[in-house]
Image (cartoon, rainbow, N blue to C red):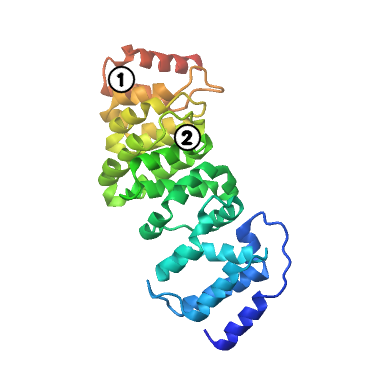
Amino acid sequence: MKKEECALNRKLIALPYEIEEINDPITAAINHPVGMLTESLFQQWYTENPSDDEGLAIEFKERFEQIILSERRPYQLGKVIMTANVLSLFRVAPKWTSDFILPWLNWRDSELAVMAWRSYLWSPRLHKALLVTIKDDLLDTANHYLELIDHKEQYARFLTYLALQKYDEYRVTELANAFKSLPREALKHVASSLNDSLSNSGDKFDEYWEHRIKVFLIKTWPKQAMITEQTVNQLALLCLNTKIYFADAFAILKHSLRQIEDTEYLVRKTLDSKLICSLPNEVLGFLNQLIVDEPRFRPPSKLNECLAKMIEFAPGIEGDERFVRLNTIVRQFE
């Protein structure tokens, strides 16, 4: 960093800026002179191509600490930009970052923590060393979920992806307690993230189900939670997305599933999955668990086809009381 640029940045950032009430820290930071100057400082730093563990050059260290140590309110927006870049800082200067920036993530100072977590969750990354270092504060953030406002969904998803990494430092009981602390609205994002992870596992599908998703559902998922219909829908989709492991998944999630109003897409996906051909009895139990006795408008349009397929691949199944129930629902609307 050239001396002239360094001096100019120092002078500009020290000017007596005004600041309005901060609703969205990221938006406020990128539109305020202090945030812009801090971002400019980072861009200059990145052009130096800093390496892991090499520490901060003195000119950058001084500029960053000028922002960190100031108690003037506009400097909060500089801290927003710094938190958004915390992984880069941690990789280059782990001790300095642990001393100066990571304490912002602790909820003892709730106002600062809200700002820091919303900034961090803008674009979080799965970096083990950092996540181990901030473990206690990250797990405690589950107790402050609603305070994250428009970044709360990102937290639920990130916590799920973190849990699937199976880091030894994050004990199963600690993760289970964090997920148990989440409000019921957050669990739909957790279930959705499980679906996304399994769908994106590629040629590691079998391993990902057996050693990650399945283990999470057994040991970490909050089984006693009163979940929303959206969450039930996502868990049902997860069962279908496990493909050849459907029976296993349904057995694990059966007690979390319940009847919901909108099953049109689920029934269509069930028919398209071809699972009825190989697991007609299990699919019957699955659909019976989900479809309400009295649909608001009409039963799922493909339910009758599903039932016909079951008869084809499991002769005699029409005598099953579950089949009789679903068939009665279809007949009522003919």
Q: Quadrant of residue 56?
A: bottom left
Residue plotted at (43% across, 49% down): 136
Q: Between 124 and 229, which is closer to the camera in this rendering?
A: 124
Residue 247 pos. (x, y %): 29, 30
Q: Which residue is the site of mark 1?
A: 311
Q: Quadrant of residue 317?
A: top left
Q: Name the amino acid, label 1.
A: Ile
Q: Earlier in the sequence, mark 1 or mark 2?
A: 2
Residue plotted at (27% across, 51% down): 203
Residue plotted at (67% across, 67% down): 32
Horizontally, residue 178 falls left or right of residue 252, namely: right
Residue 265 pos. (x, y %): 46, 34
Q: Quadrant of residue 289?
A: top left
Query: Is residue 191 visible from the viewing direction of this image?
Result: no
Label 2 neighbour load within 10 Å: few <14, some 14-19, many 20+? many
Q: Mark 1–mark 2 contact, CB under 8 Å?
A: no
Please, what secondary structure does the residue beneath circle 2 have?
A: helix
Residue mark closest to the camera, 1 vs 2: 2
Q: Name the amino acid, label 2.
A: Thr
Instruction: Residue 231: give its label.
Output: 2
Label 1 neighbour load within 10 Å: few <14, some 14-19, many 20+? some
